[in-house]
Amino acid sequence: DTEYAEAVCEKLGVDAEFVIIDWDNKFLELDAKTIDCVWNGMTITNEVKKNTSVTDAYAKNEQVVVMKKDELNKYKDVKSLSKLKFAVESGSAGEAAAKDNNLEYTPVSAQSDTLLEVKSGSVDACIIDSTMADAMTGKGTSYETLGHSISLTKEEYGVGFRKGSDLVEKLNE
């Protein structure tokens, strides 16, 4: 996302400035003009469409279940996950997937924190973006003992601007 945002901003003739926000407050931040857009793996949902002017999808993703590699073969479908405890990022597509599948979960402040919870053993698994799961787990990472196999959702990412922004059309171009 960072490199893509920088490339698009360069093409538009503006400088990208990245600001860390509380994800639960992304729409408030946008409306308060403390940020100009939300561009960070934001799933295009009805809530996003209601609160922003959102671009066309620029990427496809999915929410996956991450757990210890030696446990992966025990779980083949959503039903088999019903007795597990999960960590999810508060307000994320991972949290929505947990709710939609009636899974027991604890919300945390960031996707990276969900991985810490699994590694520490305080939860059985977490639900995060496949792109992050691929980058953060497996050989050569801090989470070599973790992996993923079950996909819970398919989704598309978009960039959200304040309602009525002409930047949506420019970015779509």
Image: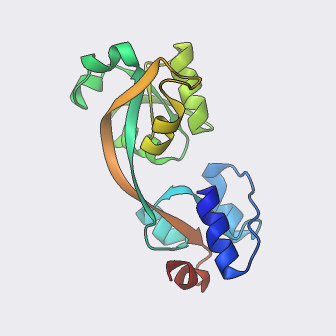
Quarter-of-image position of residue 102: top left
Determine the residue positioned at 74% across, 77% down.
14
Picture layout, residue 110 above or below residue 39: above
Q: How is the image coloured?
A: rainbow
Q: Nearer the viewer, residue 85 or 170?
A: 170
* Tally of numbered discs: 0
Please provide percent x and percent y for residue 128: 46, 38
Determine the residue positioned at 55% across, 72% down.
52
Determine the residue positioned at 51% across, 37% down.
135
Please provide percent x and percent y for residue 90: 55, 41
Picture layout, residue 8 above or below residue 2: below
The answer to whether one can see residue 101 in this image is no
Quarter-of-image position of residue 171: bottom right
Picture layout, residue 115 above or below residue 57: above
Determine the residue positioned at 53% across, 84% down.
169
Quarter-of-image position of residue 33: bottom right
| Left or right: 106 in relation to 162 | left
Please provide percent x and percent y for residue 137: 49, 28
* Residue located farthest toward the front when viewing the structure as drawn: 140
The answer to whether one can see residue 54 in this image is yes
| Left or right: 31 in relation to 41 | right
Please provide percent x and percent y for residue 27: 62, 63
Q: Quadrant of the N terminus?
A: bottom right
Q: Nearer the viewer, residue 145 or 113?
A: 145
